[in-house]
Image: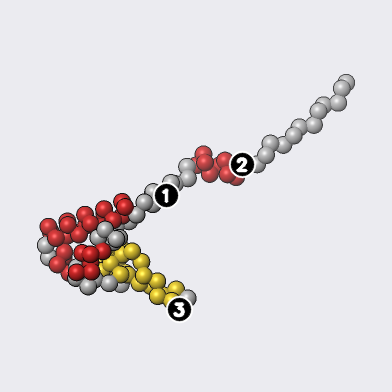
Amino acid sequence: MIALVAKDTLYLKADAGSAEHFDKLNLPPFTYVREGKAMPMSYRLAPADLFEDREEAALWGRRAYEAALRSGQPPKKKKTAAAAGKATRKAPVKKKKAAPL
């Protein structure tokens, strides 16, 4: 994920490698409140200039994409129908031996 939108505001993925660009423009992180405590995330307010300039938008988008790649979290794998079936498969029922005739 390279960006998020909250209350009509765009935030871009940031990390230590891209923070200086956001810091130069005093762009704050996206923060939410959890149990009364402010929780900043690794997304920073997007600069207003990127909405007016395609090259600027491409530059900031590339920075956000690179930060996401550096985050080191591989994409979550989706369970396939076969894998889901294995998780819920029941043990086989043992059959009784037939009585001799």
State which quarter of the image contains the C terminus: top right
CA distance separating discs 3 and 1: 30 Å
Give the left or right position of residue 85, taking residue 65 as reference.
right
Q: Secondary structure at mark 1?
A: loop
State which quarter of the image contains the N terminus: bottom left
| CB contact under 8 Å: marks 3 and 1 | no
Disc ID at residue 54: none
Res. 86 in view: yes
Mark 2, residue position? 89
Residue 83 lies, in percent from the top left, at: 52, 41
Mark 1, residue position? 76
Question: The residue under label 1 is which amino acid type?
Answer: Lys
Query: Residue 68: which quarter of the image?
Result: bottom left
Q: Earlier in the sequence, mark 3 or mark 2?
A: 3
How crowded is the residue under tag 3: few (<14 C-alpha within 10 Å), some, or many (20+)?
A: few
Q: Is residue 43 above or below residue 94?
A: below
Disc ID at residue 36: 3
Mark nearest the camera among 1 and 2 is: 1
Question: The residue under label 2 is which amino acid type?
Answer: Arg
Q: Earlier in the sequence, mark 3 or mark 1?
A: 3
Query: Residue 40: which quarter of the image?
Result: bottom left
